[in-house]
Image (cartoon, helix red, strand yellow):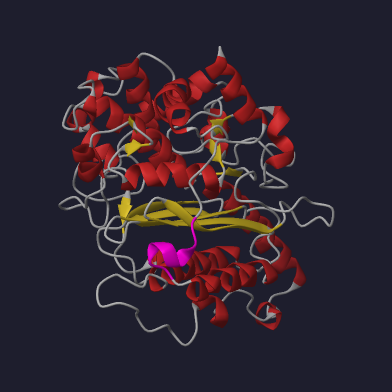
Amino acid sequence: MLTLLISAFVMSSGGGNGLPVKAPRTVGMSSARLAKIDHVVERGIAAGGYPGASVVVGRRGAAVWQKGFGKLSWENGSAAVTADRTIYDLASLTKVVGTTTALMILYDQGKVHLDDPVYKYIPAFSGGDKNKVTLRMLLEHRSGLPAGRDLWRIAHTPQEARDSVIATPLVYEPNTRYVYSDLGADMLAFVVEAAAGEPLDKFLQEHVFAPLGMFDTHFKPADSLKSRIAPTEVAPPRGYPLQGEVHDENAFALGGVAGHAGLFSTASDLAVFAQMMLNGGEYNGARLIADSTVALFTSRQPNAGSRALGWDTCDGSGSCGKYLSAAAYGHTGFTGTSMWIDPERDMFVILLTNRVHEARAKRPAKVIADVRADLSDAAALAVTDYGDGLMAMPKSFRADKAVGWNPPAHKARRHTTRHHVAKKSTHKKSTAKHTTKKG
């Protein structure tokens, strides 16, 4: 009874305890260099890339830079973002924090095997080349499934959406090429549910979020949390502004719980998850995953490019920046989220934004791409006791240059008004479609 009362208090007060907070110097980091994070994130806000952001950098079991920036929305009266209370739509971080983690647990339990054919768990996913598709291929995005399809246009119920995913034809021979696929992640979620004998959200709550004290991490968050949730799209195909309801249209069509998108969380909650991964699957005395399984799923796979199993790995470019080690692994989300974990530095970097919410920048995707990479770079460059010590700081960061963030408007004046309006309408439809493909 006492445990229940404590849990109820923690949840009502806005989350778990999170990681202990330590001064950067106590864990071998420079606070002066970490301060570059503030400059980079604030540059993104000033440029109109997103109204607010939440950041946690952690090292050696502690949060060393945990901050909120800006506001939940662009409105003057909007609440300020805080790292421990503001909840963001994670988009494709769901693939790793949710779906992949569930598979790791089931792998440890012997309930799934990586080279099993998918039809063993989902018999309807069979026939022809589908019989060759394994769980490993789904995790590596090498299954032959396309990137996505507009489930929200063709399905009227979550069951119809599920059936449409399973019935999707392969577009290439399995294990011959890489195509990042939301549908593959959805199939993995169906496998989880079949092997576990319960829904994905319930399994994760019981086996991951509750044991870690991640009380602000949910699919379909309660209405009572709405005031703490950063809004996303203002004019989605659903026809009303989104706040506390999953941004991804296909995840919504699947009922709000999907393998590729649907999770909401705080940066503080995700910091605990990241630390569990750095600890080799254990946190605060509770072991969730075997350390060998963590190592297996987060290691780059042969013939899979930079991909691990579910996770991506750092290749010295993209959202992981230039300086994280080759052992670093992570993922991004379409709404403006990212998480990178570097076991060699015993460090992680988390960024949550809602860059899909009425962005004022002309190219918000370029803004978030540069800010993500700068954040990873600033954190890595702040480590004082790795390798040969302090690395030289660059003369400027990507956010200082802001290349392509807000190109001059005169470049678009060559078109007639009628042509410009037509292109804008077409682009809006294309963008709405794209959000369903890459969470």
| Residue under the point 37% across and 84% down | 392
Nearer-the-camera pick, 91 or 322: 322
Residue 159 is situated, as x and y percent measured from the top left of the image, at 49, 19
Q: Quadrant of the N terminus?
A: top right
**Residue located at (42% from left, 33% from top):** 259
Find residue 256 and report its image quarter: top right
Q: Is residue 4 above or below residue 253?
A: above
At 41% from the left edge and 39% from the top edge, which residue is drawn? 97
Relative horizontal placement of residue 407, taking residue 110 as reference (left or right): right
Coordinates of residue 194 in the picture (x, y in percent): 33, 17
Q: Nearer the viewer, residue 247 or 197?
A: 197
Q: Measuring from the top left, give residue 37's x and y in whole percent.
A: 54, 69
261 up-or-down from 118: above or below: below
User: Which residues are the magenta region?
Assistant: 22-29
- Does residue 210 appear anywhere in the picture? yes
Q: Is residue 351 magenta?
A: no
Q: Is residue 156 visible?
A: no
Q: Is residue 278 above or below residue 385?
A: above
Eyeballing the image, is 144 above or below 314? above
**Residue 183 versus residue 286: which sits nearer the camera?**
286
x and y percentages locating residue 387 in the rendered image: 25, 73
Would residue 112 appear left or right of 394 to someone viewing this image? left
